[in-house]
């Protein structure tokens, strides 16, 4: 990993743009000011690219701890054409889908993690009642499979096998044993992969 051995074999720092962009504001306003925004454990703001089945898509910045419902319905304008909210996917391919019953969840690192999702790089995709969740899983797994470096066997082969199963299910050719097989493969990939990509399958 570059944080251990990067340029010239020396450790390097890797941060996302949001973290780096916070530095000048913190310097200008002070640490106490920044500390006053957000929750006890998740300080500052969360920036999301709000997209999907939403009336108002775009970049959204809210204080950490803002409920998902506020982001989706008050800021995002809710689901268009009278459709019902089904779930929101946060954190990109490594994230998770949060169903309607958790709409009051605060947007912060700990709360999203408790639901099996992550903040990630700030993707927030709203899904409506017509969305096939198996297709969503297949879509994000196709990215993970394509990005696998192939170094470790569980990720290299496991993501291919999972993608084949999900593709078959979305084509209406699912088998009785598919869900059990998916669980076994996903557990193996998660526990045996060498990097974070496979460990989040």
Image (tube, rainbow, N blue to C red):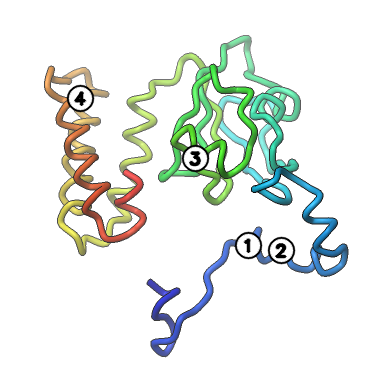
Label 3 or label 2, whichever lies nearer to me, is: 3
Q: Which residue is mark 1?
A: 17
Q: Quadrant of residue 39?
A: top right
Q: Are marks 4 and 1 in contact (CB under 8 Å)?
A: no
Label 3 or label 1, whichever lies nearer to me, is: 3
Circle on res. 179: 4
Closer to the chain start, of discs 4 and 2, is 2
Q: Are marks 4 and 2 in contact (CB under 8 Å)?
A: no
Q: CA distance from mark 1 to mark 2?
A: 6 Å
82 lies left or right of 148: right
Circle on res. 180: none
Q: Residue at the spot x=63%, y=9% of the render?
A: 82
Q: Are marks 1 and 2 in contact (CB under 8 Å)?
A: yes
Q: CA distance from mark 3 to mark 1?
A: 21 Å
Give the percent coordinates (x, y) of residue 119: 55, 45
Q: Are marks 3 and 1 in contact (CB under 8 Å)?
A: no
Q: Judge the density around disc 4: few (<14), some (14-19), many (≥20) Cα neighbours within 10 Å.
A: some
Say what secondary structure mark 3 lies in: helix
Closer to the chain start, of discs 4 and 1, is 1
Q: Nearer the viewer, residue 37 or 55?
A: 37
Label 3 or label 4, whichever lies nearer to me, is: 3
Give the percent coordinates (x, y) of residue 106: 64, 33
Say what secondary structure mark 1 lies in: helix
Q: CA distance from mark 3 to mark 4?
A: 23 Å
Label 4 or label 1, whichever lies nearer to me, is: 4
Q: Which residue is mark 2?
A: 21
Q: Judge the density around disc 2: few (<14), some (14-19), many (≥20) Cα neighbours within 10 Å.
A: few
Closer to the chain start, of discs 3 and 2, is 2
Give the percent coordinates (x, y) of residue 196: 36, 56
Find the residue positioned furthest to the top.
Answer: 82
Q: CA distance from mark 4 to mark 1?
A: 38 Å
Q: Which residue is mark 3?
A: 113
């Amino acid at each position: 990993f570059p944080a251990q051995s990067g340029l010239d074999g020396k450790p390097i720092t890797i941060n996302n743009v949001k973290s780096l962009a916070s530095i000048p504001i913190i310097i200008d306003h002070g640490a106490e000011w920044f500390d006053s925004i957000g929750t006890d454990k998740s300080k500052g703001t969360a920036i999301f690219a709000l997209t999907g089945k939403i009336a108002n898509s775009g970049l959204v910045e809210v204080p950490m701890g803002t409920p998902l419902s506020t982001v989706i319905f008050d800021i995002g304008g809710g689901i268009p054409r009278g459709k019902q909210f089904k779930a929101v996917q946060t954190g990109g391919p490594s994230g998770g889908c949060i169903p309607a019953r958790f709409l009051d969840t605060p947007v912060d690192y700990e709360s999203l993690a408790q639901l099996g999702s992550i903040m990630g790089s700030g993707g927030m995709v709203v899904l409506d009642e017509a969305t096939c969740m198996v297709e969503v899983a297949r879509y994000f797994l196709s990215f993970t499979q394509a990005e696998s470096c192939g170094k470790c066997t569980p990720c290299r082969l496991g993501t291919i096998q999972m993608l084949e199963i999900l593709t078959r299910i979305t084509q209406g050719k699912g088998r009785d044993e598919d869900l059990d097989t998916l669980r076994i493969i996903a557990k193996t990939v998660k526990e045996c992969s060498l990097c974070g990509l496979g460990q989040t399958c």
